[in-house]
Amino acid sequence: MKLVALDDRAGAEGLFIGQNVTDARALVANLELREIDRGYVEQKFAEFADWHSNASPLVSILSDQAPWGDLVLDITGVEHLFGGEHAMLDMLVQRLSALGIAAVGAVAPTIGLAWALAHCTQQRVVEYDEVSAALAGLPVAALRLHSDQVERLKHLGLKQIGQLYNRDRRSLRARFGAPLLLRLDQALGHIEEQFVPRLPATEHFSERHFADPIGLIDDVLMTARDLAFRLASKLEAEALGAQTFHLFLYRVDHKVMTLSVNAASPTRDATHIARLFAYRAERLSGEYEAGFGIDLIRLGASSTSPISEQQLGAFDAEDGTSSVIELYDRMTSRLGALGVVRHSFVDSHVPERAVRLEPVIAAPIKAKPLPPIRAPRPLRLLPQPEPIEAAFAQIPDGAPPSMIWRRVHYRFVRSSGPERLRAEWSLAHKKLMLTEETANAAKAAKQLEQYYGEGRNTRDYFIAEDEAGRRFWIFREGLFEVTATPKWFLHGFFA
């Protein structure tokens, strides 16, 4: 066990982070230790990291060394809002210092160099042409390497990163592995290092600061409506619409609440956007907690796409489609994304897989038109075929004379069929490959039987009518020649 955090008195006694607990107890006899709650620390740091999205919309946590403590912001395009990179860095660090948090930051073209400078307590701004020089004088541990790799590098006299520049890369890879070269190339900018933002990235947004924090949900929704009109103006200026909108509520206690809504099609109707958030807020039901108040609200749009201008006047053709889409959006915001669904056809021969449910706000998949089905289909289809007890058919490959379904006996007076259906080749566990060795019909047929699992994926459907005029859609699973006692199932009803 090692120390991961210290107070001022422990630091004054000469203890340091990373020290073994045994050595720490030997130096300080009355040392009081508490086991760290890693899950709690990770959660709190994640909430604190989200709060930094008021400075940059792209915020992430680097978990190379620990899942907390390393915060990275992509400030590309936003540094001018704070007076430049130097002013922005000073503002962020001083803001944390005012909260009683000791922090060191750096601005660099690469994430690896910024991390290295911050951990070496070099708070500075590095330009693109200074990357190699700034990285050369730092210790090799600044490359985010494993402790074993760092110790082996030091044993060879490689203590600074600059000493790795002219070394043979093959020998470095053989001795220390590929992670060493990867971290070096990422820090130098030869390989781009990407991170996943914690909050949704929004290219277009509008925000409002409050001199006095607000807390009522009605005030939040009223502000969201005003921001929706401002955001709609920005989207209209660029002839864009958005399908996803995010409302960020920045609390005074350095936490962020996020509220997101989706639209079925790109829109920039401010009134419609405000209604979506109003309906979405109704589902919070006590989850909304403003804490000590909200001092900043930001409304952002993502998933943008160009939309044409709409004419509103005497010659405007209204076909009702837009009203239906807005209705879907409002119902989804109130009931949830899975509360309103639609049927979507799937290119499958298996009846229960031929249709699936998808949210109405999801973009429809453009699939090729399915070929028409000539055979009749039942009016009602069971979600899954239900097994039945069927009497032996009078002729092979024929329909049974009767069945027992849910403990009720039905006697058939007439039947038609069969209609043979098989599963798609993509659903089988074995691949179908015809080679020269299986060119003849016998070998090909044998291989097909193995592919279809000895006929288990083959269904012979029949339409059977009982004495009362009820018509059932039943099928036999498997080939009659292969299966001595075939299984029968009921799949639907015609009347």
Image (cartoon, helix red, strand yellow):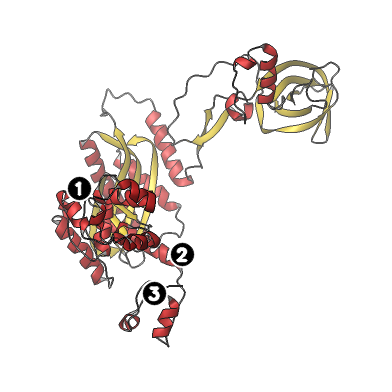
- Residue tagged 1: 77
Q: How busy is the neighbourhood of tag 1: few (under 14 within 10 Å), some, or many (20 plus)?
A: few
Image side of residue 414 versus residue 239, left or right: right
Residue 19, labelled with which disc? 3
- Residue tagged 2: 39
Quadrant of residue 419 within the rendered picture: top right
Q: Secondary structure at mark 3?
A: loop
**Kind of residue at disc 3:** Gln
At 42% from the left and 42% from the top, the residue drawn is 330
Image side of residue 304 versus residue 448, left or right: left
Quadrant of residue 13 within the rendered picture: bottom left
**Kind of residue at disc 2:** Gly
Q: Position of residue 488 (x, y in %)?
A: 77, 28
At 39% from the left and 33% from the top, the residue drawn is 323
Q: How busy is the neighbourhood of tag 3: few (under 14 within 10 Å), some, or many (20 plus)?
A: few
Image side of residue 287 versus residue 370, left or right: left
Query: Of the residues under marks 2 and 3, which one precedes in the sequence?
Result: 3
Residue 436, labelled with which disc? none
The reply to whether the C-beta atoms of the residues labelled 1 and 3 are less than 8 Å apart is: no
- Please determine whether, in this image, residue 162 is positioned above or below residue 417: below
At 83% from the left and 33% from the top, the residue drawn is 408
Task: Report the Cα–Cα distance between label 1 and label 3.
Answer: 41 Å
**Kind of residue at disc 1:** Gly
